[in-house]
Image: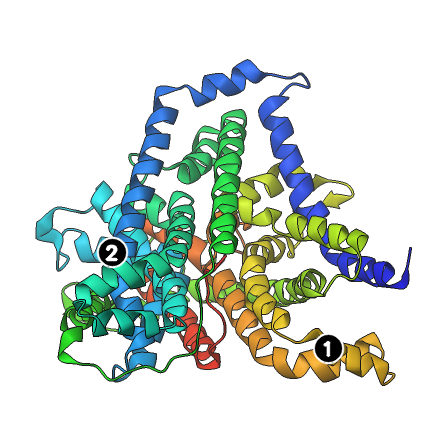
Amino acid sequence: MNRRLLGLAALALVPVLVLVAFFVVPVAAMLQLGFWPDGELDVAGVLEVLTRDRTVRVLLFTLGSATAGTVLSVLLGLPAAYVLHRTALPLRRVVRALLLVPFVLPTVVVGVAFRQLLGEGGPLGPLGLDATPVAIVLGLVFFNVAVVIRVVGSAWESLDERAGQAAATLGAAPWTVLRTVTLPRLRPAIVSAATVVFLFCSTAFGVVLTLGGPRYATVETEIYLLTVQVFDLQAAAALSVLQLVVVAVLLVAAQRTRVSAPVAREASRARPVTRADAVPVTATLLVLLYVALPIAALVAGSLRVAGEWSLGNYAALDTTGERTSLLVPVTEALANSLRTAVDATWMALGTGLLVALVVTRRSRSRVERRVRGVLDGFFMLPLGVSAVTLGFGFLVALDQPPLDLRDSPLLVPIAQALVALPLVVRTLVPVLSGIDDRQRQAAASLGAGPLRTLTTVDVPVLWRPMLAGAGFAFAASLGEFGATSFLARAEAPTLPVVIFRLLGTPGQMNYGMALAASVVLAATTALVMLLVERLRVPSLGAL
């Protein structure tokens, strides 16, 4: 084995071991539980689960709600992508940051916000949309419109506008230019964004569980309900396998779309807003209003106690709720969340940096190229597993030596780090890929070793994306609910878990505390994401 392959193996060793221990082993245990429940292959049992009437209804609802959420996200996101990336709209960076925040808000917080907006006594309560499929779709769109804006907006920002200008010079109306010139060239980005949004919608957990309960379940929430309420682990494993296959197909489709049809790029400057931009600017402001309404309803609700304006709900966060509903005060749960997010962040950042270095280094031989390609595919495998499935896999796999982590305080951070890992990798890879390899070769020719080359060539370019990646990982970990709902210990819950428990416990005080805790959690993640936006790094969600 030559020196370069040895270096590649050394870089890949840690992430490979991490993924084997915390991805391959849990998934293998889940497959064993689903197909070999008693030590013998039971295909009939899996087919019985998949052909149940409820399973079919859950699958159809998953596909229907994900399709509706994707279509609405694209329709609302396209005008905003244009306005925020091609025009010099006043305060556009602030608007862009505000529209990015919903994507990283904790899913439980979004569910609570929409219940407060659409529920009885809420500003839009008379519409009768509470606890309906429409409410779930609205919650999914709230999250994912930011993905369309960032993915399509980045492509639109770099689109060579000379073809459109030529068409306009020949007499084409603006609508004709958009329909015949611009949109066809943006099609790869639009399809890629739609595929990713469909993926996120079909695996949504907190929003669906909060707004739909057991009545309107998706595959993701059904796995949780089968495990926690019915304790039918074989059925949950069978659904997890089904979801794993579907998500893997979607990821392959997204990857092929993104690679096979690139958009022609050329730098362009934002132009002043004109009267012709009235429609997309109005649509963008409506999207901003759509994003702001649930948050405003949430904040207003948190400041109301017995019909009066008060800070009582926030003062109660230092208690265990009405009739001692919680084992620990909400403030302690917040401290748990912060500690867990810090641990998950350094784990995701360290592993993600190694993965990014491995997959972006230029290959100099066919063998090295093949090895790097295999590693690249292996590192992307966690993208095909939802947080709920991951948590379920941890639950059934990491309970015996040498990986008996049931009582370890690192169990939740590890799961959250795996959830955040794709965000870190997709933040660092574009930047590392953009560094001219000749700079590294020049440094090496001058006698610099690999570490010196890394610190003098890569780090000066990489430090801002690394800070942004850390911010993404911290925010994602802070609000993570899917895997944590399986793994968090009762005496050491995180804030999203506590909010969900307060919502499911009767009492006005408990509900008010849930609203106040949601505001605190949302404000913390929003602050982190606004700091990330200041760094201006590649798109979040461009998987």
Amino acid beneath label 1: Arg
Callout 1 environment at 10 Å: few (<14), some (14 to 19), or many (20+)?
A: few
| Picture quadrant of residue 153 | bottom left
Q: Is residue 366 left or right of residue 212?
A: right
Dots 2 and 1: beta carbons under 8 Å? Answer: no
Residue 181 visible within the image: yes
Residue 75 badge: 2
Q: Nearer the viewer, residue 71 or 526?
A: 71
Horizontal side of residue 272 vs 160, given as left or right: left
Q: Is residue 297 visible?
A: no
Question: Is residue 292 shown above or below 252?
Answer: below
Residue 471 position in % (x across, y down): 52, 72
* Direction from residue 532 to residue 459 in the image, left or right: right
Colour logic:
rainbow
Distance CA(mark 2)–CA(mark 1): 43 Å
Secondary structure of the residue carrying numbered label 1: helix
In which image quadrant can residue 466 be found? bottom right
Q: Earlier in the sequence, mark 2 or mark 1?
A: 2
Measuring 50% from the left and 74% from the top, which residue is drawn there? 537
Determine crowd level at label 2: few under 14, some 14-19, many 20+ residues with C-alpha closer than 10 A.
few
Residue under circle 1? Answer: 438
Residue at 48% x, 45% y is: 253
The residue sitting at the left extreme is: 126
> In the displayed image of the protein, which residue is found farthest to the front?
170
> Image quadrant of residue 161?
bottom left
Q: Residue at x 19, y 71 (%)?
A: 285
**How far from the left and from the top, in percent, is residue 127?**
10, 50
Task: Determine the residue positioned at 14% across, 73% down.
Answer: 278
Residue type, mark 2 in image: Leu
